Image: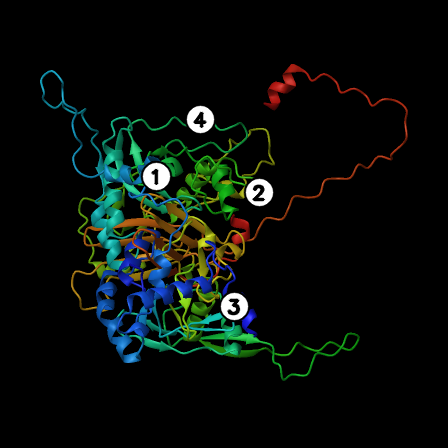
Amino acid sequence: MADADAIAFLQKQTTADGTSLYGHLTRVLSKVLGEKPNEAVDLLETSLLVKKTAFEAQESAPLVPVSATADAAKTVATATLFGNPDLPIDPETGEPIESEATNDYEAEDVVGNGRLFDALGVGLGTHEMYNIALTLKKLGEDPKRGVQNVRFFGKFFGLYADYYVFETTINDMPTIPEAPEGSVPYEDNTGTNEHVYFVCNYLGGPMTQLPIVTPDQIKAARLLKKLLTGRLDSLVSTYPLFPGNEANYLRAQIARIACTTVLAPNGQFTTNDENEPEPNEEFEGLPGRDLAETSNWVHKLPHIKKQGRCVVHKREEPEDDENFEFTEEEQEEGPEPLTSVEDDTPIADGSPAWTPLYSSSNEGVKYQVGGLRSNLWPGAYVSGKDKQSASIYVGWGIKNAPFVPLPPPDIAQEFDQALVESLELPPKPEEPEEKEEEEEN
Amino acid sequence: MVQLQPSLTLNLKNLASHGAVISAEQQAALDHSLPIKRTEAGLKTLTLWGKLTTLNGRDYLVAEGYNNPIYSNGNVIFDAKYYYSQDGVRWVDLVAVDDETKSKAGKIQSILSGDPAKVYDIEEKDSNQPPPPDEGEEAGEPPAPVIVQVPELAVLKHRIDTINDSTGVLPVHAMLPDAQNRIVPNRLFTGLAYPEKLESYMHRTVAPGGPTLAQDLRGTWSVHYDPFKQIATCRSLLWLGYTFYYDAHQMTWGALYHGNGLRNDDLIFML
């Protein structure tokens, strides 16, 4: 390289602020010669110092970091869950005004359950569980919601936001609308609609009550494999079409996950005369290590049938039709309530449906925690120790099953009439009659 | 202060809410067992890479260690060593798998068993058999397939390698090649200008200044960013369970994998 070329290369303005290596080396040399430090060769930082202290022709950085209030909203919402609320002061007496009576509710020990999950290496960690416990308290105490019983169901990951889901029963259970004629009726606050679910996108944030689930939504959800977006009102853009928006889809997935993975230790519930589960007062709990065995867990919630209901709905048998037969769906007989998970069907590749989990690799350690991990719904766990037990779901809402997309619908028939040239105008469509319209609606 | 070493404590703290949790006993054990293994193996860095779930509940904890990544021919070569442990205490070397075993291990699509001694049987066409006769001739019985055995640990290593190929996220400009072509942490890293964008993150194996996550297959990453706490998380949708976090305030980052090690092949239907 000729000298002129080399100098031209060094003088090339490389960086965005228009300096060149040539200029930089000049300034380094003049600084070193000006200050004459003892061990100039060791002071590589000089080069850096010259570069960093060079004048930058740009607006100076703000002294205090700026932060928009809107950005802080989520953090502030979670922070306000902690501590005692400040009571408003009565301006006349100067005494704090008594707050409104809070709602009485029952709940599981979320933080304690968090410790059970921590011991097994599943769940969300102690920090998050504490925030969840306080969010649950806020939901339970809210007099407008009138919650009787609340449990933390789990966390669903979404593309843009996550969902925290709370499973409740409330004083005023929603009124169930009539199903359209000809379709399977909705379950009336039993079975799949036994619980009301509340979701929020961040802890301490606004709660939304999820709609009830209908049998056709559960059936449609079984054909799909779809990630959640994190916005309840977004479309579920799939084929086959899903009847409803993401809130309905999330609710259908919750129903499917709950019936398969919400478990109770064997013996905590018994069935009464009407074959319905009820708490067993004499239950003494199981040692943690035993709770890693599938034979010690039972399904707490009823099984959802192919029809999309927990209790199969059978059409009324017409008297005059001899050829009437119930469909396969209507004849399905599911397992008894509180079936042991020991007999759960293995997942598609033949692996067992549940995996045992222990809190310690050493059998001799006392006070252990045991539990199960679902292989069918990755992210579903149960954990227990003595009388305490809990179920949780932390995942994407995706079932671990081979997915076969439904083939597209049949191709529509071609127009099969001969195409004849004609000078006549096409016939005008007849005015639709009022009656027909009503029927269509 | 810029992060110079991966930090297990910070990873676990920041990624727990994304489901990357390890048991209390294992966390306690790792505090002791990782430094012991690091010294034994003579490694500069040894940290928890993630957890692969198994069928028998004895999940594989995987640790990754390396000395100085080398920059050569436009690629960053980490030459990482991998170790697995089922109790968080004893770490066992995972040997590299050759290309032949790789292609066989890729055919196994089930969750790992949790028994390191298990051997998987795969049926393969016998390459030594004569080719089947052409059409027209009497078609004989198809040649009996040969049973090839693949050890579980090879499958485990293969899964770690394939996950690393499409993850291994770093903030751009966090690592730089030095004069000796070693990849070193950039001590002058000033943070990312747009932490909410995929353009701010890259795979650690590509050259500095090379393609970012934005050039990955579209839709394979989901980024969340909290502008107040200044924490971004990138979750891989192709490898559900891989989560990366970047804390712009504390200037730390890290990633963990917690899953069954299987790729989400149905992603195209799920978006």
Tell me which amino acid carries mark 2. Pro
Residue identified by numbered label 1 = A71
The numbered mark at residue A177 is 4
Q: Are marks 2 and 3 on the same chain?
A: yes
How far apart marks 4 and 3 lie (CA) works out to: 83 Å
Q: Is residue B93 above or below residue B14?
A: below
**Earlier-in-chain disc, 2 versus 4:** 4
Q: Are marks 2 and 1 in contact (CB under 8 Å)?
A: no
Q: Are marks 1 and 3 in contact (CB under 8 Å)?
A: no
Q: Are marks 4 and 3 on the same chain?
A: yes
Taking depth in this image into account, of B214 and B49 the one nearest to the observer is B214
Report x, y in % for residue A357: 29, 61
Q: Residue furthest front?
A: A34
The numbered mark at residue A7 is 3
**Earlier-in-chain disc, 1 versus 3:** 3
**Earlier-in-chain disc, 2 versus 3:** 3
Asked if one can make out residue A425 in the rendered structure from this viewpoint, the answer is yes
Judged left or right of residue B140, residue B30 is: left
Tell me which amino acid carries mark 3. Ile
Q: Are marks 1 and 4 on the same chain?
A: yes
Q: Is residue A346 above or below residue A162?
A: below
The quadrant of the image that shows the N terminus of chain A is bottom right
Residue identified by numbered label 2 = A240
